[in-house]
Amino acid sequence: MIAFLMTIEDEETRNILEEIYKLHKKKMYYTARDILHDDYEAEDAMQEALIKVSKYIDKNMDPKCNKTLGLIVIIVRSISINIYNKRKRRKTIDIDGYENVIHDDTIGNPQLNIIRLDQKQYITKKLSQIKKEYADILTLKYYYGYSNKEISDLLSIKEGNVRVRLMRAKNALHEIIGDESHEK
Amino acid sequence: MKNKENEIIEAYYGYIGEIYVDTIVDELEDKKEEIKNTTFPKKLDTWVEEYIKQEEKKEKRINLIKNIKKQSKKAAIILLIIIAGISTLIFTVEAIRVRVFNFFIERNERYTEIRIEEENNIKTPELDWENYYQPTYMPEGYYFESEEDGGLIKILNYSDGKNQIIITQTNNSAGIQIDTEDATTEKININGNEGFLIIKEDRSMIFWHNEERSFTITGNIKKEEIIKIAESIEKNKK
């Protein structure tokens, strides 16, 4: 019973991870350093982020595309915030409030929102008004298609918190973009 | 209708996510110069290199264990094709006990099963991993990496950092199954004991036994080297 002629089935995945690292290491490090202002903690955050990324690499992932870069930035940012919170002995960053949400009473019609979908600039501007944690979680769920369990692992938060945060994210989004028909 | 509505809303969130990702990338692009001038710690490069290597090793180990489990489940037993002159007489030093080992070989389309059977119902000693065999020769660059005791099998892993040489030893009555599809096989002699050499693509494997144990060596090495390793195997007394 010998693993004769054993092949490395997942060499491809390791190659993708290596390429992601080569292409984006400075951006990752910069993102972590920008939050933590500490070289050692930024290194820890990067290592943790790379370990997480390696679990979610699929063979169709293109290291060069925006989608991949977006994912690793979201992961490294989230890990850095967790490290920052631990350092400050805070439980979590306050993401429950809506203080950054700016109400726009001119919006409210779902049809109007659909029409506005092609208005990238408009949405970009609106997105800048909600917390990054909310935008992160919505993006992981609906753009990357991760399950709540996967998001809980990626962001190192409890699965229950994923659900709560998603709901709050949707509410915040609808507060600023407006949609009466959104899911509750 | 509700589902359709949900699909639309989810697609809407997905689109917003896509725009959000573009925003992230644009923000990084704006800070391009700053990022470029950030001093990057070189030790992270070393860490990543090590991490990737470790993952590779871990995967190899998992594959090995999977294979062992898979093959051990097969209840295949054995047609015998006794090789010409088939049995080999092996005398102990005292020439008192005579053991006859027969190679029992079953060739299938994809693998060959080899087993050594002892006549006279003489059992080989119980496996004692305190006194196992190990090579005294290794090709240049290879070093001892790890060992595993799988109960009935002892596995020694050697590596040159990239390739592995795996040496196994088991009780003589244990069967092994070897992937011989599209492989060339050859009968060989290791220190007076009969064995087999199997070569497939750039991988070589050798199987032989002595009066106590059956051995295999596999690796991406040449025939001459693998035979040299086999001939250098000696009992290690801890």
Image (cartoon, helix red, strand yellow):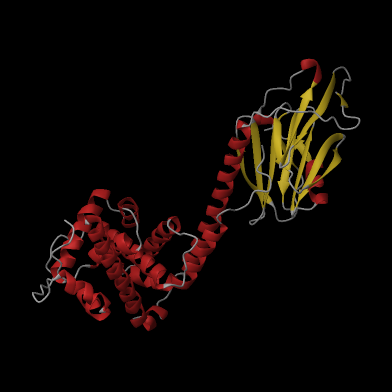
Residue A39 in sight in this render: no
Residue A49: x and y, percent?
39, 60
Is residue B27 shown above or below B17? below
Q: Is residue B99 left or right of residue B215?
A: right
Q: Is residue B201 left or right of residue A44?
A: right
Number of numbered discs present? Answer: 0
Residue A122 in sight in this render: yes
Outermost residue to the right: B85
Residue A105: x and y, percent?
8, 74
Is residue A100 shown above or below B174? below
Residue that appears at 41% across and 68% down: A68
Q: Is residue B49 left or right of residue A156?
A: right
Q: Which of the 4 quarters of the picture holds residue B109?
A: top right
Residue that appears at 69% across and 38% down: B168
Q: Which of the 4 quarters of the picture holds residue A130?
A: bottom left
Outermost residue to the front: B1
Residue A144: x and y, percent?
35, 62
Q: Is residue B50 left or right of residue B190?
A: left
Rendered-image quadrant of the N terminus of chain B:
bottom left
Residue B100: x and y, percent?
84, 23
Is residue A61 or residue B145 the one in the foreground? Answer: A61
Is residue B25 shown above or below B48? below
Rendered-image quadrant of the C terminus of chain B:
top right
Is residue B82 shown above or below B196? above
